[in-house]
């Protein structure tokens, strides 16, 4: 009997030991008894020195794997992640596996099956199949040696099974294996000197760990740098992981990679079925896929020979998981590259301040692309002062004139409004009452198309009321503007032109996003309207004008990261203009044209803003020059939140190196019927912060009040709201 330590998918920071009478390795799945149920866990350690008395241990019910589903490099990464983010190990390990493996599916990498005739089958004659034409055709097909499933698709499975049962054919599994290398099927584009320098630096680093930050203006050809950096890896039979922030970028990126390389390219994102993701997982493990393009969870795929990691739009906050296991994919990708001894390339036109600080401190090599790849000029930016302007549909007269001019020139116009729905709320004209979510400290958004009020925080929906909830008046009207309303208004203003709306509501159906992008890329003059979805790496060569409808709401925020995020958003959205042969223009509507942030980004560019923002962060002792962790707590009763966080704060009296901010209410104090409070922890020394977290977490598990609230710990939080 071997004592095995098993990581189970439960939110407890404790070990579970079992006896096992079968040979098993760390990283294999086992089924074990746990209370009145059975759970599937991962063997983490054999014969641990601090095990319980073996007479008290239960026995493993079943060993599910002969070989580990989590190889040593992945286990090392996940162990680091569990320690760094202070999350239960079992939860971390199981989150790295596809759902079908978590449910106990066989992990053998079977691609298909090969059928061939047995000796008995070879002695059959055509006469024996006189009355069964399908079986005769199948028998004739099976005369060919090692006939694979793909060649037998036109035969019913029951016919194949019948041959096997009769002893006329035997079946052999066909396993996935390393892909066949091939030359590039599309010629590389010529590189300018800055691009060539970047490609050379990455290629020279292959085979060892190096971290590069590729800072290139929008349209500078970062994707071509990625492609040419990948080329020697694909020719040598290695594997590459490309992380992108949003599913919306995946089809466009996938098409570009498939056109260039004659090797298998796979995708990984949350819109795939469980079977599709399981297949990609298997193909990665066996080396059958050369390149995988995926969102953040693709980081945990089990590559056979990972030789290069690329993070596109590395600044994007979508790389931070906001629920459950709160990891940052960019930071863990750097750790994985270190473990696998391969280079990692972080690309962005607007790098995060954390990455720029790492450049300053010599941890990252800095590669710059200061010019657009085809020599196009950067778009010119014009501020439209909304004060004393005659407005129509949220647009100034000058804005409407510019839109009309560019449409007449045969160009596309992109309008950015980061608010979906028809209007942020309904208001009563009689008393000023507004529609609020009964579960959150927020207004409900009016969606005209579905005739519903939707809370964009908790998802609650209800029908549109006929009367005011305050005075009973029927004079209810939309207040504010969302993309749905602006789409309707643009159709009235420019009836001769198509309006394409891109937001979460209009792209819910599978394939709808790709269909909309294809329509835009056809190049016909039209109006493209959307939210933040438009700001992330899309290449629209016929867009001549970008209009940013409203940024004023983002200029004043209680989050210290808000200026950085706004500067990134403005730069990224503006970068969609002028990517073709014609120069681009950007109109930015605001009531505060003299605001220091707007002036800095417009006059000096993002790079200048970022360097001054870094100095400001250093002077005010904020990340990345301080290390931050955050306790959030939720409860139906306000006093439970306050009392629980006060206990955490009292614990920190023994840790003078850690500064506290709070307890205080979250900016959105009530969500989904629960009150939300937080406590922010700052420390100059990362090690001391994590030691203090280990100490307080061991106490929290013993508090009876911890069972009355829902609490989370977020290390390196990106969203303080």
Image (cartoon, rainbow, N blue to C red):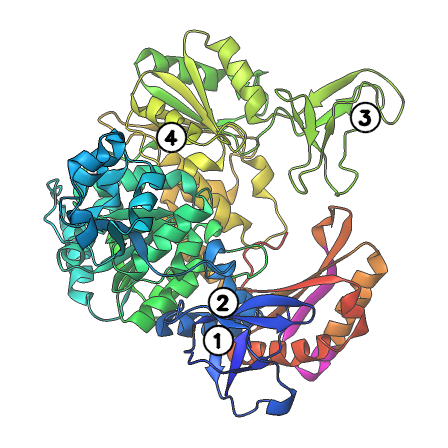
Give the residue at mark 3.
432
Cβ atoms under marks 3 and 2 closer than 8 Å: no
Q: Secondary structure at mark 1?
A: strand
Given residues 77 and 629, the one toward you in this image is: 77
Cα gap from disc 2 to disc 4, whole angstroms: 33 Å
Which contiguous range is marked in magenta? Answer: 651-665
Q: Residue furthest right?
A: 471
- Closer to the chain start, of discs 4 and 1, is 1
Give the residue at mark 4.
514
Q: Secondary structure at mark 3?
A: loop
Q: Is residue 492 left or right of residue 681?
A: left
- Closer to the chain start, of discs 3 and 2, is 2
- Closer to the chain start, of discs 2 and 1, is 1
Cα gap from disc 2 to disc 1, whole angstroms: 10 Å
**Mark on residue 93?**
2
Q: Is residue 660 left or right of residue 243?
A: right
Given residues 681 and 82, the one toward you in this image is: 82
- Closer to the chain start, of discs 1 and 3, is 1
Cα gap from disc 4 to disc 1, whole angstroms: 42 Å
Vertical arrangement, residue 147 with respect to residue 432, above or below? below
Give the residue at mark 1.
43
The residue at the point 47 percent across, 55 percent down is 100
- Closer to the chain start, of discs 2 and 4, is 2
């Amino acid at each position: 009997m071997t004592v095995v330590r098993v990581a189970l998918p439960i939110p407890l920071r404790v070990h579970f030991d079992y006896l096992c009478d079968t040979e098993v390795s760390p990283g294999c799945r086992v089924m074990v008894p746990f209370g009145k149920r059975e759970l599937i866990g991962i063997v983490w350690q054999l014969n641990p020195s601090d095990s319980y008395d073996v007479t008290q241990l239960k026995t493993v019910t079943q060993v599910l794997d002969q070989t580990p589903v989590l190889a040593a490099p992945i286990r090392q990464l996940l162990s680091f992640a569990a320690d760094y983010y202070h999350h239960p190990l079992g939860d971390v390990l199981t989150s790295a596996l596809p759902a079908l493996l978590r449910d106990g599916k066989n992990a053998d990498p079977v691609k298909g099956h090969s059928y061939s005739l047995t000796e008995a089958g070879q002695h059959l004659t055509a006469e024996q199949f006189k009355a069964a034409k399908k079986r005769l055709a199948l028998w004739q097909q099976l005369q060919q040696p090692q006939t694979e499933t793909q060649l037998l698709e036109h035969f019913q499975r029951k016919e194949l099974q019948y041959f096997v049962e009769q002893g006329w054919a035997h079946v052999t599994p066909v396993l996935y294996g390393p892909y066949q290398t091939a030359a590039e099927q599309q010629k590389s584009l010529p590189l300018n000197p800055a691009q060539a320098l970047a490609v050379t630096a990455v290629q020279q680093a292959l085979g060892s760990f190096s971290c590069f930050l590729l800072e290139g203006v929008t349209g500078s050809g970062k994707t071509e740098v990625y492609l040419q950096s990948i080329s020697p890896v694909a020719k040598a039979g290695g594997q590459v992981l490309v992380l992108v922030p949003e599913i919306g970028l995946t089809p466009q990126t996938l098409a570009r990679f498939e056109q260039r390389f004659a090797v298998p390219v796979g995708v990984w994102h949350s819109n795939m079925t469980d079977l599709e993701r399981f297949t990609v997982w298997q193909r990665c493990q066996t080396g059958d896929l050369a390149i995988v393009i995926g969102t953040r969870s693709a980081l945990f795929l089990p590559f056979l020979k990972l030789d290069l990691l690329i993070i596109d739009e590395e600044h994007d906050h979508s790389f931070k998981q906001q629920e459950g296991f709160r990891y940052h994919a960019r930071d863990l990708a750097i750790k994985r590259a270190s473990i696998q001894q391969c280079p990692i390339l972080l690309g962005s036109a607007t790098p995060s301040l954390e990455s720029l600080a790492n450049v300053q401190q010599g941890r990252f090599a800095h590669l710059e692309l200061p010019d657009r790849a085809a020599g196009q000029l950067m778009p010119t930016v014009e501020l439209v002062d909304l004060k004393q302007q005659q407005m129509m549909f949220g647009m100034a007269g000058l804005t409407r004139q510019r839109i009309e001019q560019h449409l007449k020139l045969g160009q596309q116009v992109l309008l950015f409004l980061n608010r979906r729905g028809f209007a942020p709320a309904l208001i009563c004209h009689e008393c000023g009452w507004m529609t609020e979510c009964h579960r959150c400290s927020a207004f409900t958004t009016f969606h005209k198309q579905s005739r519903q009020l939707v809370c964009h925080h908790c998802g609650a929906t209800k029908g549109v009321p006929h009367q005011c909830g305050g005075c009973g008046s029927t004079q209810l009207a939309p207040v504010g503007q969302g993309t749905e309303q602006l789409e309707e208004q643009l159709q009235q203003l420019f009836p001769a032109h198509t309006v394409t709306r891109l937001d979460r509501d209009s792209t819910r159906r599978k394939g709808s996003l790709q269909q909309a992008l294809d329509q835009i890329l056809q190049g016909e003059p039209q109006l493209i309207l959307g939210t933040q979805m438009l700001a992330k790496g899309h290449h629209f060569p016929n867009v001549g004008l970008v209009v940013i409808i409203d940024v004023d709401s983002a200029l004043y925020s209680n989050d210290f990261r808000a200026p950085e995020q706004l500067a990134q958003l403005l730069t990224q959205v503006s970068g969609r203009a002028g990517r073709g042969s014609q120069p681009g223009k950007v109109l930015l509507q605001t009531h505060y044209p003299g605001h220091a942030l707007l002036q800095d980004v417009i006059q000096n560019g993002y790079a200048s803003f970022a360097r001054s923002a870094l100095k400001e962060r250093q002077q005010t002792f904020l990340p990345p020059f301080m290390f931050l962790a955050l306790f959030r707590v939720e409860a139906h009763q306000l006093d439970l939140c306050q009392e629980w966080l006060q206990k955490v704060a009292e614990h920190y009296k023994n840790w003078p190196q850690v500064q506290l901010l709070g307890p205080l209410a979250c900016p959105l104090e009530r969500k989904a019927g629960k009150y939300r409070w937080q406590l922010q922890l700052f420390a100059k020394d990362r090690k001391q912060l994590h030691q203090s977290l280990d100490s307080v977490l061991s106490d929290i598990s013993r508090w009876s009040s911890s069972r009355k609230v829902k609490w989370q710990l977020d290390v390196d939080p990106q969203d303080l709201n």
